[in-house]
Amino acid sequence: MSRPTRQIRATLVATFTDGTVLTDHCGRLPARVITGAPVLAAARLARGLHRESDGPVPALAAIDRTADGLNMLVHLGPLPATPSVPAGHRRAPYGAFLEQLGPAPAAAVRTAVRTALLGRPVADLTDGHPPGHAPTRTERTSATYTWHPAARPVPAAPVAQVWGWLLDRRGRALLILDSRGVASLPGGRPDPGEDDRTTLAREAAEEASATIGPPRLLGDQALHRPGHPLVLQRRMTAHLLSLGPSRPDPDTGETYTRLLVPASWAQLLLGWGPEGDEQATALAVGDHQGGIEEVPTQGLAQLTR
């Protein structure tokens, strides 16, 4: 009896500037078995999605080797968040979409989107991960997260981390990238005796050489890990006042890449679950124009509102 032929697929990951992703009515990414170039196959899938002749062209972002075959993930976007989508399709919040995938497919989609948005070479993956992959501190784990906006009561639990949505005058959020290209907000663990505002100001300075205005509470993220007590990850927001020269983080020794990203689609780089969707929505800001700006190593001085 002959073995079944392993499939080669083109999967279209079309993202939008409001932090959503295109899915079919069953919540799946558009995909088809291919015999030719994956970009051309994805372009056919994208027909009717973006009709302008000078619009974006689908770009191969990742090649994922799975037990079922080879999956070519092709990215299109971020596209303007217009009401029009192809018949039988819808825009789904990115984090909610990722949560309903298995760990390996979700990892592959995250990598494909980050690779495309950051203009990096095509990612070579096996079951969603690059060779020699080891999880970093900001990657998803088996933990679950529940978002509690500032106005909603929060469970009684210690605050383990304070991270900040730090916004420039255009409503762009400051993200940092580690050496693996995984995005995060600036922040970290409180030192003994610190209040939340002091922790955020210190971590922003240490990780991103950022000075900030007075922070305000955005909400708390409850972190549930099997076999561990409940802890809170506090999320605050503040105005960015300046970004100084890059320097190593004293905790890790790593010098992070700093990005200014429209807050409405920062979640596309963060790749968090529904709690990430809720946080971006809670900011109620976001300049959809332009794109990602990498902060130069010498920093930026003109960030006041």
Image (cartoon, rainbow, N blue to C red):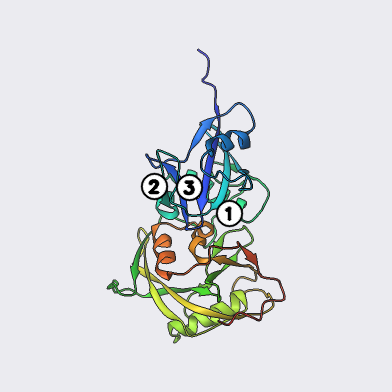
Sequence-first tag of 2 and 1: 2
User: On the image, numbered disc 2 is attached to which residue?
Assistant: 100
**Residue drawn 58% across the image and 42% down it:** 74
Which amino acid type is marked by label 1?
Arg
Asked if residue 17 is positioned above or below residue 294 in the image, the reply reads above
Label 3, residues with CA under 10 Å away: few <14, some 14-19, many ≥20: many
**Whole-Å distance between the Cαs marked 3 and 1?**
12 Å
Disc 3 secondary structure class: helix
Disc 1 secondary structure class: helix
Sequence-first tag of 3 and 2: 2
Q: Front-most of 134 and 236?
A: 236
Asked if residue 105 is positioned above or below residue 235 in the image, the reply reads above
**Quadrant of residue 144 in the image?**
bottom left
The circle drawn on residue 114 is: 1
Q: Position of residue 138 (x, y in %)?
A: 51, 62
**Whole-Å distance between the Cαs marked 3 and 2?**
8 Å
